[in-house]
Image (cartoon, rainbow, N blue to C red):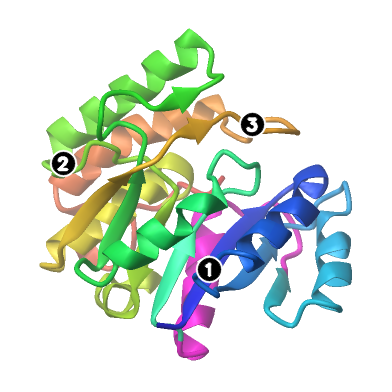
Amino acid sequence: MRVLVVTPTYNERDNLEALVAAVLGSPVGADYLIVDDNSPDGTGRLADEIAAREPRLHVRHRPGKLGLGTAYREAFTWALEQGYDAVISMDGDWSHDPGYLPALVEAAARADLVIGSRYLNGISVVNWELSRLILSTIANTYARTITGLPFRDCTSGFQCLTRRALHRIGLAAIGTSGYSFLIELKYRVVKAGLGGVEVPIVFTDRRAGASKISKAEIARSMVTPWKMRLGFWERGTGFGGDAA
């Protein structure tokens, strides 16, 4: 199975070099794609330097901070064009441990969506403030209740999608970003009649840098599940107005 790991970046220079080494050193033998939104701290330049000596690392540069959803849509489209069998989305701050990549790939042999879940066996989160943990658990319960998704961790960004899933979900129609994108992606997989499973992970707060989650994105993530339930996602235009 040809696997591609994708990480959108914005100001992740301090994390990048070690993360690339860990991903490329994983036994799954995946290639790695960095999608950088013109990071002021030089993340994109460093990625290019590493790619010059690591042929399995690929870099795409974008002109500015255009949002998580558009970064992943671009990356997923590129992955299909390059013939990858599965794509793993992963954050660039070490909150997603590359040590879990084999578990995600192994589960992808029996499901078109594999979610690295923080909440499958209770709560597996390290170094979060209590307020953030409460917000995350409430957001997941809220999204699951309204959309009917069968997953414990609807907002997880650590996940593996097969080539079949990427073909079936209608990438061009997805208009959400941030938490909203992560929910919509899972919703489209389920509505396409494809199976999803969760594998347990331990989520650790970022090693360096600052969180990119805005209050506006949190607010949008509360509206998006209702738009899904009301059928806006089926109209072929995404949900609109959700760029980060």
Query: Can residue 29 be seen in the rendering of this structure?
Result: yes
Q: Name the residue tied to disc 1.
A: 27
Frontmost of labels 3 and 1 is 1
Vertical side of 17 occupied by 55: above or below: below
77 in the magenta segment: yes
Mark 2 vs 3: CB contact within 8 A: no
Q: Residue at x 51, y 63 (%)?
A: 72
The quadrant in which the N terminus is found is bottom left
Residue 167's spot in the image, x, y percent?
A: 30, 80
Q: CA separation, marks 1 and 2? A: 36 Å
Residue nearest the viewer, comparing 233 with 76 = 76
Residue 146's spot in the image, x, y percent?
A: 15, 34
Query: Can residue 174 be seen in the rendering of this structure?
Result: no
Q: CA separation, marks 2 and 3? A: 26 Å
Residue nearest the viewer, comparing 98 with 12 = 98
| 195 relative to 41 in the view: left or right | left
Q: Earlier in the sequence, mark 2 or mark 3?
A: 2
Vertical side of 189 occupied by 150: above or below: above
Give SS at disc 3: loop
Direction top: furthest residue = 130
103 in the magenta segment: no
Q: Name the residue tied to disc 2.
A: 147
Disc 3 residue type? Ser
The quadrant in which the C terminus is found is top right
Give SS at disc 1: loop
| Residue 209 position by quadrant | top right
Q: Say which mark, if any, is on residue 211.
A: 3
Q: CA separation, marks 3 and 1? A: 29 Å
Q: Write down the region rendered in magenta.
A: 61-83
